[in-house]
Amino acid sequence: MSGGAQRHVSLFRQPRFRSFFVAHAISQFGDRISELAFPLLAVLVLDATPAQVSVLTALVWLPNLTGIFLGAWVDGRAHKKRLLVAADLIRAALLVTVPVAFAFDAGTLTQLYAVALLTGAASVLFNTAYPAFFVLLVPRSRYIDANSALSASRSVSFIAGPALGGVLVQALTAPVAILVDAVSFVASALGIGRIRPDHTARTARADDPEPGTLWHRARDGLRFTLRHPVLRASLGCTTTVNYFSFVFSALLVLFASRTLGLPSGLLGLALGAGAVGGLLGAVLAPRLSERIGVGRSIVAGAIVFPASISLVAVADGPLWARVGLLGAAEFFSGLGVMLFDVNLNAVNAAVIPDGLRSRVAGAYSTVNYGVRPLGALTGGALGTWLGLRPTLWIAAVGGILCVLWLLPSPIPKVRSLDDLDHPDGPQPDLTEAGRSSGR
């Protein structure tokens, strides 16, 4: 079937993608509840300080520093689906320990730190196995459409998840809300376990580990990423915006609850209402990329996403104004991040060779996600030293600087994925150099 004909067939008529979409949507919904419940549990029950809340956020992302080696290991495993299922079940088991401990008055901040660290490690396993699994679900011509659909489900979770999370925390306590996320991971594991991927000859070749030590294979992934002009600019941009967005996110719940004085339920509603922008961005991303080009859509999202933090920094006045500005900030943040993510993820998937997908994902996440705990810790330190509002302004201005990585790169000139060379074609300056270093 040609690429043009494939685009007229709904992705939801394809059983493999449909099953993964449902599993992904359930898991994302649970995540939104837990993301609100975890810091609220630390702040409201354990009376955590700004620095302690930032450490909790940092520990979730700290395991990404091992991604470069885990990705090299994952590339040598033939059954990526088993790794995805295992990662979901591990996260579910870890999260269950939180409500159990607090039910017996044994919950501590130390336990929350341990759960955050270990669930973060399981997430790294999932994220490094996912790219090689994703290309089994949809053809290259549908990467943007598939990312749009998955991102749309994530955005819907941001609409309903925080609102429900706030209600659950207020009515049934934060540990019960975290239990809901544990159940969502079990449901995700069951959904992914039902998928029967079509292992083509191309994929089988990608699953064969190349000769060389784990260190050499890990180095291949990092070298390919840094030498490829598209991936290098993509990594620099996402790393910059993630660092400053985590300076912001580490303080968001604390700022909203203590400085703005928003109760848990109203905070959840504000975040959920603002996430409508994410859904709109996910839906509009394919259409906007067709109209102005994939590259320009990425640049637009890279500016709008961090700039929205400034609306939170100026929030003040009556309760309706505080809630409104927080909701508006989330709306434009969601809109920008989806224009950015949907298109950039598709571009990255289109330029990475099959045999390097998990290695590149591991190297990419080591830098991109590894900087997040540094951002969170910076937010806690600056929030304590300068105050919360000045720190939010630093996050807004610093985040916008991410666009400086994109402008001199080939990305703004990309009209469609067809403008990009197929990753498994001849690339002597990049692929071959990476392969030779691994032997």
Image (cartoon, rainbow, N blue to C red):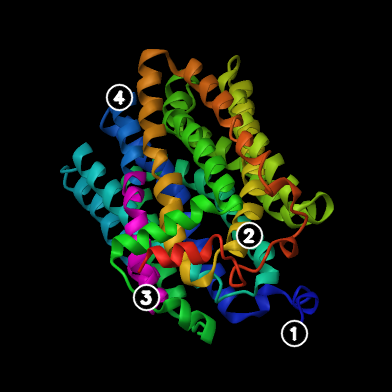
Of label 4 and label 2, which has the lower sequence position? 4
The residue identified by callout 4 is 49
Instruction: Please determine whether, in this image, residue 26 is positioned above or below residue 281.
Output: below
Of label 2 and label 1, which has the lower sequence position? 1
Find numbered disc 4 in the image and state the secondary structure of the residue it sits on. loop
Residue 182 in view here: no
Of label 1 and label 3, which has the lower sequence position? 1
The mark closer to the camera, 1 or 4, is: 1
Give the CA distance from mark 4 to mark 2.
39 Å
Q: Quadrant of residue 418?
A: bottom right
Give the CA distance from mark 2 to mark 1.
20 Å
Q: Is residue 6 left or right of residue 307?
A: right
Find numbered disc 3 in the image and state the secondary structure of the residue it sits on. loop
Residue, x 74% and y 61% (percent of image)? Answer: 419
Instruction: Please determine whether, in this image, residue 418 is positioned above or below residue 313.
Output: below
Q: Reply yes or no: does residue 62 show up in magenta.
A: yes
Give the CA distance from mark 1 to mark 3.
31 Å
Q: Residue furthest right?
A: 291
Label 4–label 3 contact, CB within 8 A: no
